[in-house]
């Protein structure tokens, strides 16, 4: 017997759960891509894509994944030999740095470990040290999907301003867009990248680069730019195919349309952010209770202000994190996220780390159910844990709703 | 803000949650109904439909709902003026009796209230009193969907045998088939009725009547039989259309095929029963905890042995049951079942009663999530409840898995 | 190699081709059946169902197929021993008569063969002969799906009026509703039956009975009525479940909603009729050309006015009809309808008869493609046929559009 | 009234018609991308992707469209300043050249117009002239989607061999793969590019680059290579994410799996090619008849051997091509392809050119239906055309099946 037969719940930090409405919208015959309803529909996507990043400036859509958007942003921002200052608070900050370096960009990396937010003093110092103005852009994750560390973008902006440096500010919102509060224009961000499969609730296959008018103007001569990555025609096409540098991703567009309607019209962006805030708090309350007393359970990021609202990374003494993941998948229909890039000498295979996503199309039932299943697994496996976690999480939900 | 945006969970006792595989199987072009693959596929449905009711005898499938199967069973078993002995332990026992009476059958009703199993002594007495043998069949629900009372079919069979009466035994398994253990042949049942939308995990629209060779032989002359209800050609068609008395319910058949494969092949019928047993136990553990101390929460059926494994009916002092249902639907994405037929003078609008389904395509995540959401709602609404319910439910799951 | 790989076209007279929109609407999670959006949606179905039959009176919806609607109509119109006058112009007229007879109704059958419309003089004579007024209703098909003979309902009404008989007029529109012009109220029809899977473009599984206020009043005491067939609560429910005598056919309702929107709003009922008129004319033009000269091809019904607009029955000398059907299915992706009930001594296995449907979700491409494939098959199989059929059919389309 | 209500047929040369099986396979919840069934499934894709291009060497899959594969191939084959010899027989040959030039590659373009195959003598001469060996690769379309000109790849190989030049041979099969015969290894091709939305019958969103071991070795140092385009890890991943340089295109993979099964297992690649050969011949037969006599209708490519088997470009004197396209879309449910890149001084808006696709999931019914609808439109619009086209096309089908 398995208690897992039923709807599977994928609580990994992307791909997130796709709404039935999104999947149904994608289940349709191919459209004409030269004229007609598709073209009209797509015109309505652009303002909504801008709204979800809270910008009134420019957006380019790519057939690609999150890594593609790193490369797209890099190709548009840099010429070979330009310098980037990259902040890393987990695996994905390093990833963007590696992408840049492999493209011929000179990368200065500020590594803040895997559990803490950036030290903006170091950022300011690095920018001040760049007397020749070789740093063209500062690259950071908003929330690192691997560590769940959240970086304060207003704080980073302040440090850049304090240094009086005019580098562009580029932010990877892959794990956070449509989950955490994010205000591109108000926060002074020049380039934002994100992908379809997390807060945007659409299958993997599309990526997005939003860019400021300033970035557009300043990067006009970037020599890493290629026809596919060039954000110019994508943001301002004169023929429909130029939006996509070729054939449009027809079915993803229908799914994305539905997802954006759900976010912006049916629920409202601020309500979406508020929902994620509460769901995250419920997860944290459970971990606080499980970790109380002297046991091996604890969240990766100490302070709530530094935690992403879409995913919670946590340690459960090796090999218990892995055992628990396997238990919940087989016995209860819940797939938790693996620890990614968190291995160290004490846990080389990363069996003491897991992630719980609460991202995108996710409600109280799904999140509380995942927590309850985790506690059932701890009981089943004899993993020591503090009491009261589920009541605490339910309390967070009950009081917030 | 609402914490309900996300996948909706329908925890009403039917229609139950349809597996994606079932819905996908139904999303297809219409097939040829005169020759080809559909006809081959349907031949494989019959043994599987028999297996799910644990019989090797006969089955007739109808385009219809549960009420249609009552009428079909009645039409095949009775002539006008024949007598039926009907046991009622909730709304649906009365419903079958009303169906029979309206068809011209003389009904003797044994009403055991809404919270208790039948008193088999009364059944035996009623049968002994039928000296002329006017009672052609005893009709009962296995689990009454409204009250969640479960009737022991072996116990009923024993009472009938003790009375030495040869009436047929007909059982309504609409709420229980594919959830509670049920063994038609071994338990000496003559007629079983069920529908597609509960344990069989397929949208409403099909009903089934299984019947014994004895019932077939004895009822050959039933004069209520009409072409549509006649179980003869449906169970033994010489042309494909006769299985359905006309056009086949093509899309439901594809869904049903998938559902039966999931039950019988992928999981196994005994594992399905065992899963429901554990999920029900988890729900009961939560209600036991919530109801501990002096508050208004309690399950409708006192003894676990008398409770259905697919649905739990409970009272939460009016109007709190209704307030809680509304809270979970709006705030958390969970739709609970209303109280049905449980109104009385102290609660004429039935606002003190609800039902939680744990039926069909349902796993630990879905069930624990529903319970956690209910507790969140009690907290949010200030409904008094005993502590420890979620940990207790998680414990049941954790220890059983 | 087969030239059939591609989208299959089911040109059988039911189930017809379901629109993707209908199938997509049905691919969704189960809804709450006690409150909420489903209930609101269903209220909008009733006026649209009435509009499609052009009546302002009453409609009852059943979970069932076309045969179920015969039985439903019979059960509501008749008491045991009442008399029905049934007109047969093909297999399905006989079918309704058999249904009635098996339910205990005294049937007087007027058999007009398999290729000709009714002789209304005989109808008038039969009614005049019923001095005692035993005939409670006249039953007829509008279009017999097997023969494709169409009966003039205004002509029949006129004959009934001429006879001065007050029998109800009941019409089987299973093959014609949403295809052929039909005006229930204007034509003086009392009872109309139809099903979901033909002109209504929805999978098999629902049937409908429209009835006049006169029928409602006059049949109030019909003793064949049972709870499931009773049209009263279905047409005028006080609780939602009464519309369906139990659980609603949730997924079919979503499909039907979409289909009715397509017919009534997107295209318009008169445009739907006009489309079928042209498509039928194109098919007839092809058959006229194929049959010109001395060969074995010819339509079943001589005069266009007597032919249904949704299906064309034709002979192609045995065994060529069967050979051609097999050829088009394997080689070209087109499934044609078999001859049904047309066997006779010269062709006992009915290999000289087939049917081409042009019914429901069907356009010029689908219909002309089917004709072209048939001609390809005739060429491939060496079946003699007259020239110019495809050009003639294309001409009908081209001049009408 | 419109005769277009019914299933729409998209006869544009990509996206082609997606099989229901492909769309259904894509309609599913997101999978775990770190372990489990998806990873196992993907291992089986690689040999099938190689089989469809008839190579045993290497394949890299990209989230991207056809243009992305041009850029991917360029990035892997070239360093800045390297030279490419590009053959153009229509819009898309020019497109690949432009992509290369914009990436910093020195392009020598051989333009053979829009209606004729390459002159291999010129190719040989150009290669002989490259004494310094600056030409690293010869780039060509197999079939140019815009002109429908087909280039003989064995002929091109022969010319390259005759010149004794060791440039790589790179072929764009975007419009032809899975339609026209293509044998990468046997024909001595080094690099093949294609995308998902034409012969591979899957929605736009994936592209593929097959490459020979020789290309792999020789291009190891290409300095245009970036992390996203790098074919190395994509063809030989050590971790699953490396196949996709990030998150996998989960839903497209399920669709592609189904499409490859249909092509390779259910039908067979050679049968697929043969089917396209016949369907193309039927289309050509119709155009031959329509164009007979002195009218403005004619195919773009004179000789059948030089025509692609997946799409036929044709002229119908301006503005009749555009009028006909509009007529068939509105009146008959068929969307034909526009003329692309064929405008000239006599027809600046390209209203005298259209394309009929017969590509991918396409059978006799679909193709003959499209032709019949075109003829209906010519009749409706009064466009002069020769007689007998439909009978001729049906004859091709009938005799070949």
Image (cartoon, coloured by chain):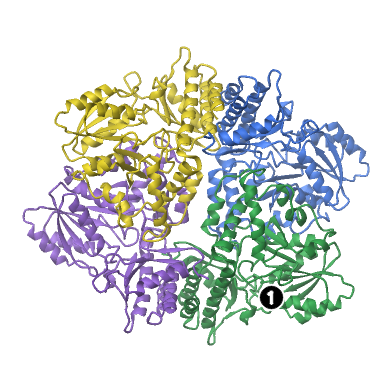
Chain colours: A blue, B yellow, C purple, D green
Residue shown at the point (60%, 69%) measured from the top left: D179
The relative height of residue B152 versus residue D34 in the rendered view (above or below) is: above
- Outermost residue on the top side: it is B294
Image point (36%, 50%), residue name: C205
The residue lying toward the viewer, choosing from D139 and D214, is D214
| Viewer can see residue C102 | yes
Residue D111 seen by the camera:
no
SS at badge 1: loop
Please provide percent x and percent y for residue D379.
46, 77
Q: Note whether A152 is above or below A78 in the view shown.
A: above
Residue visible at 47% across and 82% down in the picture: D388
Residue D226 x %, y %: 80, 54
From the top left corner, tell me how far across and down residue C337 is, in percent: 36, 65
Q: Which residue appears farthest toward the left when viewing the image?
A: C131
Percent from the top left, x then y, of residue C218? 16, 46
**From the viewer's perspective, is B197 left or right of C141?**
right
Q: Is residue C194 above or below residue C297?
A: above
Q: C264 or B95: which is nearer to us?
A: B95
Tell me the quarter of the picture where residue A189 sits. top right
Residue that extends furthest to the bottom in the rendered view of this protein: D293
Residue B372, compared with residue A217, is above or below; it is above
Give the crowd class for mark 1: few <14, some 14-19, many >=20 residues within 10 Å: many
Residue D308: name its quadrant: bottom right
Name the quarter where the C terminus of chain C is drawn. Answer: bottom left
Q: Mark 1, chain letter? A: D
Residue nearest the viewer, comparing D213 with D69: D213
Say which residue label 1 marks.
Answer: D151
**Location of residue D273 (image quadrant):** bottom right
How many numbered callouts?
Answer: 1
């Amino acid at each position: 017997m398995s208690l897992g037969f039923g709807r599977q719940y994928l609580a990994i930090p992307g791909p997130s759960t796709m709404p039935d409405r999104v999947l149904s919208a994608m289940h349709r015959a191919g459209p004409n891509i030269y004229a007609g309803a598709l073209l009209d529909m797509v015109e309505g996507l652009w303002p909504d894509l801008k709204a979800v990043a809270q910008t009134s400036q420019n957006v380019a859509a790519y057939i690609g994944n999150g890594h593609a958007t790193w490369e797209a942003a890099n190709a548009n921002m840099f010429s070979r030999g330009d310098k980037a200052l990259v902040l890393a608070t987990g695996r994905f900050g390093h990833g963007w740095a590696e992408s840049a370096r492999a493209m011929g960009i000179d990368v200065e990396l500020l590594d803040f470990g895997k559990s803490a937010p950036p030290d903006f003093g170091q950022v300011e110092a690095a920018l001040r040290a760049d007397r020749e103005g070789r740093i063209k852009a500062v690259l950071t994750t908003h929330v690192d999907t691997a560590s769940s560390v959240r970086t304060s973008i207003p704080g980073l902006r302040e440090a850049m301003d304090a240094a009086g440096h005019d580098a562009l500010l580029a932010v990877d919102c892959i794990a956070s867009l449509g989950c955490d509060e994010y205000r591109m224009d108000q926060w002074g961000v020049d380039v934002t990248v994100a992908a379809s499969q997390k807060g945007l609730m659409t299958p993997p296959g599309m990526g997005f680069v939003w860019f400021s008018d300033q970035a557009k103007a300043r990067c006009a001569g970037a020599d890493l730019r290629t026809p596919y990555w060039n954000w110019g025609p994508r943001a301002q096409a004169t023929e429909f195919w130029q939006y996509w540098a070729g054939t449009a991703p027809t079915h993803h567009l229908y799914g994305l349309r539905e997802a954006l309607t759900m976010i912006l019209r049916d629920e409202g962006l601020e309500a979406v952010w508020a929902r994620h805030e509460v769901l995250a708090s419920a997860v944290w309350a459970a971990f606080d209770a499980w970790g109380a007393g002297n046991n091996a359970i604890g969240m990766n990021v100490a302070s709530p202000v530094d935690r992403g609202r879409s995913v919670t990374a946590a340690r459960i003494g090796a090999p218990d994190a892995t055992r628990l993941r396997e238990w919940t998948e087989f016995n209860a229909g819940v797939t938790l996220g693996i620890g990614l890039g968190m291995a160290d000498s004490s846990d080389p295979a990363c069996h003491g780390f897991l992630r719980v996503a609460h991202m995108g199309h996710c409600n109280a039932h799904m999140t509380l159910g995942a927590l309850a299943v985790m506690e059932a697994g701890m009981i089943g496996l004899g993993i020591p844990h503090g009491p009261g976690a589920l009541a605490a999480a339910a309390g967070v939900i009950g009081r917030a709703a």
